Amino acid sequence: ERERERERESAREMLIKQLSAAPSGCQVWSHAVLAAAPSGGRWAYIGTLSVYVYCTLADGAYALEKILYGKDEVIGSICWSPREAGRLAVNVQDHIVVWDLDTGGPPQRIKVDGVYSIGWAAHSPHVLASGTCAIFGSGHKDGQVRLHDLRVGSNELIHSFSNTPTVLRWHRSLPKLAVGAASGQVALILNPGAAKLSGCSVHFQTQTPNKAAVTDLQWDPLSEHYLLCASSDGELLLLDTANQKAPVLFAFQQNEQPKGHTSLSWLPGVPGGFASIGASGGPLVRFWNVSQTKPAELLKLDKQSVNACHALCMLLDGSRKGLVAFKSGVVGVYDFEKRYWPFVASAGHTDTVFAARFHPIDRNRFATGSFDGTARLWELGGLGGGSSESLCVGTLYADEVQITIGLNGPIAKALGGAIEIGIALPANAKLGLGVVGYDAKYALYSLSFEPHSGDRLAGGTGSGTLVVWDVASGRGVLGIQPWVDSSCFRRWSRVRR
């Protein structure tokens, strides 16, 4: 009897044993989502609520070292200490959070209402800058730049903008801060020294030609004054911050750079060479030289993917390896010299998962639905064979399915069966729907496989829309909206196929 009890206990343990896990995908509504440690031994990306820290192993491989999370707060951006490989900071809506990876103690929190962007000073290990949002949360009608001394947790206003400071970029060695704003403003703020936050002055100001929001700024590693600037309108500029009268040294051809968010990075060991990616440019990296108006080369990172690149950050290990984040949430390390991927992180969704359903026929396949507006198809490989990595084999997009209003006969015919429908939670039940970049009407709150063959998948969205995909092709078969502004749960009928 005791032996049978041990067997039953063992069976119960096996039922709840974790077989596989995929980290959250990289957050896609902000631009500062990647960061690299100064030694090159660590790098990180942010999900919606967590920070994923990877380390370089002795054999050169990469492994997930830590997952950092605190309160249930949406993370906006990340930066690493330029001097210390063990310290990094993120911002949430009303705080800056600083972690020490080596000590493992509780994070330091500095209260900053409406913080949108952050930057860690290279000339001092104790100075952080923050940009506060001019639209929500801060209580101010203008955007502000503030400085913080981490030793005492200070919070000092040093300059105001007509709009939100979107990018904060400290010089690699000097006490000066480049600031880019949503209004297209670019300013240079001089900090008198590491021990004194007061007395800062604005030395330089200009604006992008079309007043488009600044999406990235990068200091030239070979110059004290040259600064690369990218805007949401696709503009790429080389600025001379020492020349207030004629600051634009070079304007790169706009039709060669896609509009939307643009991320920049100087290329190590290539004087005047830099790379750019654009949100609407697909999986392409454009290589430039400051002496030419057109890109010297276009590189397609993934020949199989039509997914756009989202962010770029070079590793600080002296190589030409860089972190690349895609709109799907996938993050990888790419070697721009040898042209291959040394590492690609397995990624889950980019926001909260609300639904998970196993395939009715194949027990090693399942689907998940998320607030990010996608359903993902997964396969568990090698169960019982030593490998428990979960593999995403397909992504289905709710916003790509054509919608028909109402229910009628042709719709039922197209479905080839019947679906039971009922009202569920309201569309605004997700905390933080006001976060810029997400459209809650595409959030998937429910999923259901066709029970007889599993060849179709139905999902319910935040706008009350029912979407149906063909699993094999990933094509949207049908979209109907029987209700407005409410989410529905759906289940395939087990009587009528």
Image (cartoon, helix red, strand yellow):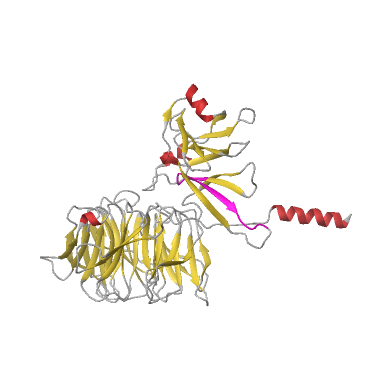
In the image, is 97 to the left or to the right of 244? right
Horizontal and vertical percent for residue 352?
50, 48
On the question of residue 91 being in view, the answer is no
Residue 35 locus on image (x, y percent): 40, 66
Name the spot of residue 336 as percent of width and height, x first: 37, 69
Q: Residue reaching furthest left?
A: 245
| Residue appearing at x 51%, y 59% in the figure | 346
Quarter of the image with the C terminus is top right
Residue 13: name its quadrant. bottom right
Which residue is nearer to you in this view: 37 or 312?
A: 312
The residue positioned 61% from the left and 43% from the top of the image is: 359
* Up-down relation of residue 179 to residue 163 (above or below): below
Q: Residue at image x 40%, y 76%?
A: 317
Judged by its main secondary structure, the magenta piece is strand
Residue 417 found in image quarter: top right
| Residue 374 on the magenta segment | yes
Image spot of residue 7 (x, y percent): 81, 56
Q: Nearer the viewer, residue 414 or 483?
A: 414
Task: Tell me the magenta residue range.
Answer: 369-383
The stretch drawn in magenta includes residue 252: no
